[in-house]
Image: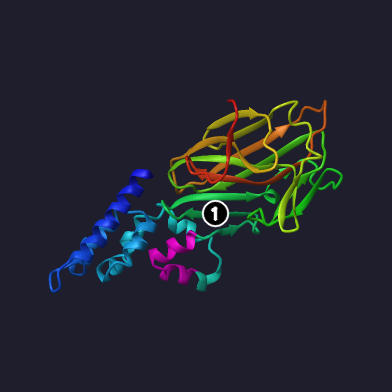
Amino acid sequence: WRRRGAMGAGVSSFFFGAAAEAAPGAAGLGDLPELCAAQVLLRLDAPEICRLARLNHAFRGAAGADFVWEAKLPENYRHLIGYVEGGGEEGRRRRRRAGTKEIYARLSRPVSFDDGTKEFWLEKSKGRVCMALSSKALVITGIDDRRYWTHMPTTESRFQSVAYLQQIWWFEVVGELDFCFPVGTYSLYFRVHLGKFSKRFGRRVCSTEHVHGWNKKPVRFQLSTSDGQNALSQCYLDEPGSWVLYHAGDFVSTNPRQALKLKFSMAQIDCTHTKGGLCVDSVLVYPKGFQQEKVVTGAK
């Protein structure tokens, strides 16, 4: 990423510098054929393409070419755009008419499915698929009993709600997912928070009064796929006061046109003690190496 970023910066500096130094009446970058400009853009990431499109009319025209943006999209983007809202024949016609630049822009925004409990999007730089499943898309032991769990509204979740555990003996969170992932290696995380947080006088405060039981036994994370991949790890939860991504495992997608079924879980089912004070927000699937929050990886 650093090398590509440096290259993009170097390319931008070269072009802008050349444009500034061109003598009046001399041939400049504005005279560059759009096909040549497009060949340059094919070697850049999406944000770099957008920056160069502001340079002159040659790059601006090339930046609208379908083949430039198709090269940045996942190979199964036609399948992915089928999730976009607007069903029926009219919706299908609109999607067929859309250019690849428009498709890239739409898929870079969250696309919800399964009644809004799941969503995916393309991370804007590389066009790789990311995914999130809300706590309501997971099977949580005791979730319907308010003695154990409550659904807590919050702006700190992309789904505007998290599951808060007050106290329980048997802790288990299980999920499944069927999806056609583009070819690549992905990491699956549970996004959780120790302690109950709130806003007071405009400031975020976190109470850890009811956090207990997580230091006695580790939590076990499991991941399996329909084509035989498996991962197992465990670690103690000991990061109160902030959101943490706990790494459940990695998997590889090799066929973007065939749905891969994932099964995953997070559990601490030793019934010799209770545990509580935990917020479960979501399960995240990111391209391996892409992460935006603190990550904890357990022992395999």
Q: Is 74 displayed left or right of 174 in the figure?
A: left
Q: Secondary structure at mark 1?
A: strand
- Relative vertical location of residue 122 with respect to residue 206 in this rendering, above or below: below
Q: Looking at the image, which residue sits at the far left?
A: 26
Residue range of the region highlighted in magenta in the rendering: 92-108
- Overall secondary structure of the magenta section: helix
Where is mark 1, residue-wise?
120
- Relative vertical location of residue 138 with respect to residue 112 in this rendering, above or below: above
Image coordinates for residue 250, horizontal then vertical, percent: 52, 36
The residue nearer to you, when weighing 118 against 164, is 164
The quadrant the N terminus occupies is top left
Q: Is 235 displayed left or right of 70 in the figure?
A: right
Image coordinates for residue 211, horizontal then vertical, percent: 78, 37
Residue in the picture at 44% in, 56% down: 77
Other-residue count near label 1 (Cα within 10 Å), few / some / many at <14 / 14–19 / ≥20 = many
Residue kind at label 1, given as amino acid type: Phe
The residue nearer to you, when weighing 293 against 113, is 293
Coloring basis for residues: rainbow
- Magenta-colored stretch includes residue 133: no
